[in-house]
Amino acid sequence: MTPAEHYRMFAHYNAWANSRLYETAARLSSEQYRADRGAFFKSVHGTLNHLLVTDRIWMHRFTGQGDAPNRLDAILFETFDELRAAREAEDRRILGFVEGLDDRRIEGTIKYRRVSSPEEFEQALAPALAHWFNHQTHHRGQVHALLTGLLGQAPELDLLYFQRLAAKPVA
């Protein structure tokens, strides 16, 4: 698997996992969805917003395009339906970006500023992509735990499960 293929797999996995997580979160009552459950971003609502915030920040760093929120705890959308639609659009944007990467570009660098400080960083793109996909998995895991506590179950999100599904021939 080339580096470009590796990150394409993660982009497709990311969209798949987000879709499954939102499908389950849609079953929550408004009170459950917004309840402070002690997570870092408090609620399912806060954590799902954070994931979109950081994806937009990183996509701006990678492409120079799109909104880049200036707070990691920003609430971009108040309603679940608006947030879900924005999530689906962002996942399509991420897929488009990653599909356009080749190994030569992945070996390059990016320059960016952090949300919390004005200093500029230059970083190799490959480890930045790895961090980005890992960050998504980290916070999806938090939502997964919240859903388990609230509903008694959460969707299967393992990468191996996704890979097995993706490898099955279409009937």
Image (tube, rainbow, N blue to C red):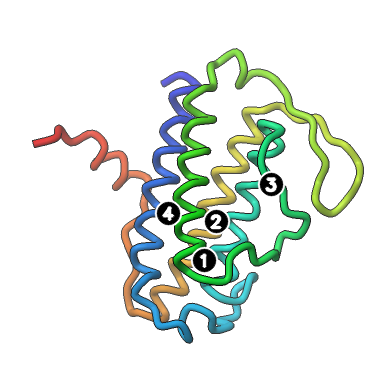
Say which of 165 and 32 sits in front. Answer: 32
Q: Identity of the amino acid at label 3? A: Asp
User: Circle 1 sits on which residue?
Assistant: 142
Say which of 159 and 26 sits in front. Answer: 26
- Marked residue nearer the N-terminal end (1 or 3): 3
Q: Identity of the amino acid at label 2? A: His
Depicted 163 relative to depicted 48: above or below: above
Side of 133 relative to 32 (left or right):
right
User: Circle 4 sits on which residue?
Assistant: 18
Residue 67: numbered disc: 3
Q: Identity of the amino acid at label 4? A: Asn
Q: Are marks 1 and 4 in contact (CB under 8 Å)?
A: no
| Quarter of image, res 1 | top left
Depicted 157 relative to depicted 126: above or below: below
Structural distance between the alpha carbons of marks 4 and 2: 12 Å
Element carrying mark 2: helix
Element carrying mark 3: loop
Structural distance between the alpha carbons of marks 2 and 1: 7 Å
Residue 41 in picture, x, y percent from top left:
63, 70
Element carrying mark 1: helix
Q: Are marks 2 and 1 in contact (CB under 8 Å)?
A: yes
Side of 66 relative to 103 (left or right):
right
Residue 57 in picture, x, y percent from top left:
69, 46
Q: Are marks 4 and 2 in contact (CB under 8 Å)?
A: no
Structural distance between the alpha carbons of marks 1 and 3: 25 Å
Give the residue drawn at x 91%, y 45%: 118
User: Circle 2 sits on which residue?
Assistant: 138
Give the residue drawn at x 72%, y 53%: 69
Give the residue drawn at x 33%, y 44%: 160
